[in-house]
Amino acid sequence: MTTQRFSTRRARGDERASRTRPGARTSEEEADGEREHGERKHDEHEHGQHEHGERVTACPECGGHLAADEERGETVCEDCGLVVEADAVDRGPEWRAFDASERDEKSRVGAPTTKMMHDDGLSTTIGWQNKDAYGNSLSAQKRKQMQRLRTWDERFRTRDSQERNLKQALGEIDRMASALGLPKNVRETASVVYRRALEDGLLPGRSIEGVATASLHAAARQAGSPRTVDEMTRVSRVDEQEFTRTYRYIVKELSLEVQPADPASYLPRFASDLDAPDAVERRAHELVETAKREAVHSGKSPVGIAAAAIYAAGLLEDADLTQREVGAAADVSEVTIRDRYRELLRTAQNARGQQAAD
């Protein structure tokens, strides 16, 4: 019994001694130390995230709430004023929209729209390759299924006869523009002209190919890349008479502002086809500009004026160009070249004489 009391008394004394021993920590002090250690680790973690470019959700100094200043591109702590992030990159659009329609109009997300397709390029097509996503060939049964899907997809893309008409015409415009080497902006303009003709009801009684050819010819002249009537007729599916008649009708009804073709716009193409030196092309430009100032080109074919200017410039620059070669490149007769080049040389000589007299 005595031994048991002594053991109990000794255990209590050891417990009191441990409480009063210098440097010893109570349970409450240990809990506070653990909390401080955890907060320190949390701050260090957030500071490390900031250094590595990750998004910081709390102030690394005081743990306060952060606010974004979009005008200055800064992230600032609302409690202590610390600038956590500066020179932030604005990843939004550079435009502003105030309603849904304006947002849809200004948005550039997705594939660009184009007037060269009947649906403005908004639909999708099933590819012609009979392969899966891994590049493996499809089985015979799957190929038949994909072919049926392509057929129905092609049918669903055109809802009515007007869309089928537009699809055929735009394909014809693209074919002729490719054969003539016309740029994309001319094709876009020709597609818009044909759409206007279709909306205004100008197609009844006229062929799709004729209106498409007239639209492309008008667009080429508006863009400063004109093509001759003979060139248009060679790539078109209609004859010259129907093409010219439809062209005059389209220009009149749609009130298209088509200026007379400039002879100078034909010179680069003719010089390129003839492989003429740059000096010949420059001299031809000078002859054409002189003829335009003296109004010699009025009432004459611009193609004939351009061909004659190339030939006359070849004579002045001692280039080996014959009337037959120039006529073949410009698709004009040798008689036209002989008549026009004499007029150009005479006009240039008279202009030089007037400048000398002045």
Image: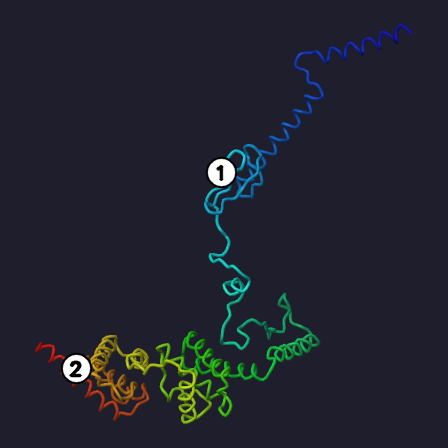
* Element marked by disc 1: strand
Give the spatial CA distance, label 1 vs label 2: 74 Å
Placement of 44 over or under 94, stated as above or below? above
Percent x, y for residue 82?
50, 35
User: 355 or 100: nearer the eye?
Assistant: 100
Quarter of the view holding residue 310: bottom left
10 Å crowding of disc 1: few (<14), some (14-19), many (20+): some
Residue 86 located left or right of residue 144: left
Quarter of the picture containing the C terminus is bottom left
Amino acid type, label 1: Val
SS for callout 2: helix
Where residue 63 sits, quadrant-wise, is: top right
Q: Position of residue 241 (x, y in %)?
A: 41, 94
Q: Nearer the viewer, residue 159 or 174?
A: 159
- Give the residue furthest to the front: 98
Residue visible at 55% across and 75% down? 119
Camera-nearest residue between 236 and 272: 236
* Disc marking residue 348: 2
Q: Nearer the viewer, mark 1 or mark 2?
A: 1
CB-based contact (under 8 Å), mark 1 and mark 2: no
* Residue type of the residue flagged with mark 2: Ala
Q: Residues within 10 Å of mark 2 (few under 14, many from 20)?
A: some
Q: Is residue 30 left or right of residue 1?
A: left
Tell me the residue that label 1 is attached to: 83
x%, y% of residue 158? 59, 79
Residue furthest to the left: 357
